Image (cartoon, helix red, strand yellow):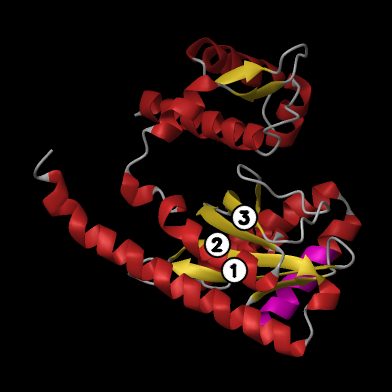
Amino acid sequence: MRAARTGTQLLDKTFSILRRISTRHHVGWSLSELSQACGYHHTTVHRILRFLDREGMVARRPGTRLYVLGPLAQEFGLAVHPAHDLRAPALEGLARLARRTGGGAFLNLRSGHDSVCAARIDGRLRIRALAIEPGTRRPLCLSAGGVAMLLRLPAKERAAALRYGLAEARRIGPQRLEQARGMVRRSTREGIGINADGIIPGITAIGVPVAARDGTPIAALSVASYSERFNEAALRDAVAALRREARLLEDALESSARASPSALEHV
């Protein structure tokens, strides 16, 4: 029993480190930064990184001592089952949203208490201030799409996700903490994920959840553009368009789930 518990703890630490590394997928993390951010002893992190590096799950960023995800992570991603790949059925809807709003349209996936950008399509307005791109990982409470998913979680899980996210925001700084709290408060009032000038001045983002058959939020669709373009009428139109595309994506996922058993019988 003790060996099993130790093994489970090691797996928890390993995946915690991998998730942390994925939050800086271009920049990378030093050993000491990972140790401090994850709250694990330097020796433990070093031992886990050595193993992951040997297997190709992490690698050193060329010319540095910083760790990034390695080639094995990409290989695993290529082999994901179609039932768990939301990008393909979402791309047409993202393109429609980008054309309609002129800004950026995003598909975010829920990963525990985090939100991960899976796809981004830009409209005619290429907004350079938007640093979110495929692979970007943030706590749910730090983006409009993430908050949209947060609000749909059961109360106990929502509270846990909020504690986690606010702790991460506090680590960044008091200003980000207050921004996150303000975004959650307004989103709760309005029933959608909304971030109006909260993190990037002059930029507004809105998001709605995409739910599984049982109502659990598994993803979110969001759009972001210059705040001056989101007057009251434009905001209503964008929310309606997001909800429409979310329903279409949910229908596509439901159809795929129904088709999967018969399709697998012929493999």
Q: Is residue 70 left or right of residue 228?
A: left
**Quick check: marks 3 and 1 in contact, CB under 8 Å?**
yes
Identify the residue shown where x is 57% and y is 21%. 70
Q: Name the residue under label 2.
A: 94
In this picture, is 168 found above or below 245?
above
Q: Give the range drawn in magenta.
A: 179-189
Identified at 61% across, 31% down, the residue is: 17
| Relative height, residue 75 to residue 118 (above, below) | above
Q: Do the residues labelled 2 and 3 touch (CB within 8 Å)?
A: yes
Residue 135 painted magenta = no
Q: Position of residue 77 (x, y in %)?
A: 44, 34
Spatial CA distance of label 1 from label 2 is 5 Å
**Contact flag, marks 1 and 2 (Cβ < 8 Å):** yes
Asked which secondary structure carries label 3, the reply is strand
The answer, for residue 57, to whether it is visible in the render is no
> Can you identify the residue that label 3 sits on?
121
Residue 97 - label: 1
Image location of residue 57, percent across then percent down = 52, 21
User: Which residue is nearer to you in this view: 77 or 45?
Assistant: 77
Magenta stretch, overall SS: helix
Q: Residue at 83% across / 65% down in the picture?
A: 179
